[in-house]
Amino acid sequence: MDLFWEINSSLLLGFGMTLGIFVLTLLGALPLGLLICFGSMCRWHPLRWFCRTLVWIIRGTPLMLQLIVIYFGPGLLFDWPLLPRFIAVLVAFIINYACYFSEIYRGGIEGISRGQYEAGEVLCMSRRQVFFKVILLQVIKRIVPPMSNEIITLVKDTSLARTISVYEIIWNAQVYIKSEGLIWPLFFTAVYYLAFNGLLTLVFGYIEKKMSYFKV
């Protein structure tokens, strides 16, 4: 019984690390994704080319590879000191998810017909008023379903942090496979993921329901 509680305490600590990666990634990736989105839609070609190339590279390579490059790359290429492991994880995750979010934002914005902008101008509304009073709610409604999918994927992708030895929940479970020959701690991690993703599913379902009045 003592071992049982010890293992569950360890899993809880690991899940705390998982939550930390999840929350901090969202806090960084959501606004950065919006900036990349605006850059990829910018009329200044060098900035648009840079943003779209960045998105293409990030979306076209595995997150695990990006983690390894960001952690080991500066030291191997420039002889710089290694980043702290947790910081390297955050940098990799924020850049990766910002690029995915930017494409979702861009799809939502570009999916609004040009006629709605023109209708706002006919009513003598400024571009700012048109965006915030006419366009924004429609964009939010359009992007909620794909954003919810990406955010739920982020919960599961946090397990990749163990690639550079960040002690998230699966790493803590694997310790007991090696030391005690127990497999059930690994199965217990599924309970944490399922419970958290189930909660997120309910939250996003509620948000979609609240916005269902707004037809687009």
Image: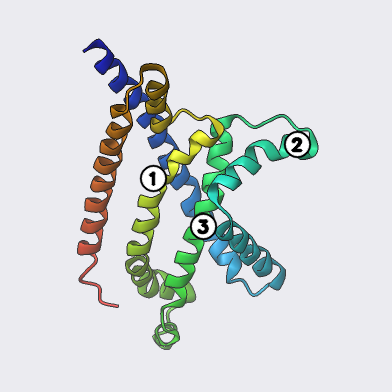
Closest to the observer, 86 or 166 = 166
Residue occupying the point 39% across, 84% down:
116
Observer-side mark, 1 or 3, equals 1
Which part of the image, by quadrant, shows the N terminus? top left
Question: Disc 3 designates what residue?
Answer: 33
Instruction: Quote the CA–CA distance across marks 1 and 3.
Output: 20 Å
Query: Quick one: label 2, few (<14), some, or many (20+) residues within 10 Å?
Result: few
Upstream in sequence: badge 1 or badge 3: 3
Under mark 3, the amino acid is Gly
Residue occupying the point 60% across, 47% down:
66
Disc 2 is placed on an element classified as helix
- Establish if 89 lies above or below 9: below
Question: Disc 2 designates what residue?
Answer: 76
Residue occupying the point 45% across, 38% down:
21
- Establish if 28 lies above or below 54: above
Upstream in sequence: badge 1 or badge 2: 2
Query: Quick one: label 3, few (<14), some, or many (20+) residues within 10 Å?
Result: many
Instruction: Quote the CA–CA distance across marks 3 and 2.
Output: 29 Å
Residue 11 image offset from top left, x and y in percent: 33, 26
Does residue 35 appear to the left or right of 134 in the view shown? right
Disc 3 is placed on an element classified as helix
Image quarter of residue 150: bottom left
- Establish if 207 lies above or below 182: below
In the rendered structure, find residue 156 and report the number of the disc placed on it. Answer: 1
Under mark 1, the amino acid is Lys
Residue 20 image offset from top left, x and y in percent: 42, 35
In the rendered structure, find residue 206 and report the number of the disc placed on it. Answer: none
Does residue 47 appear to the left or right of 117 in the view shown? right
Upstream in sequence: badge 3 or badge 2: 3
Under mark 2, the amino acid is Leu
Observer-side mark, 3 or 2, equals 2
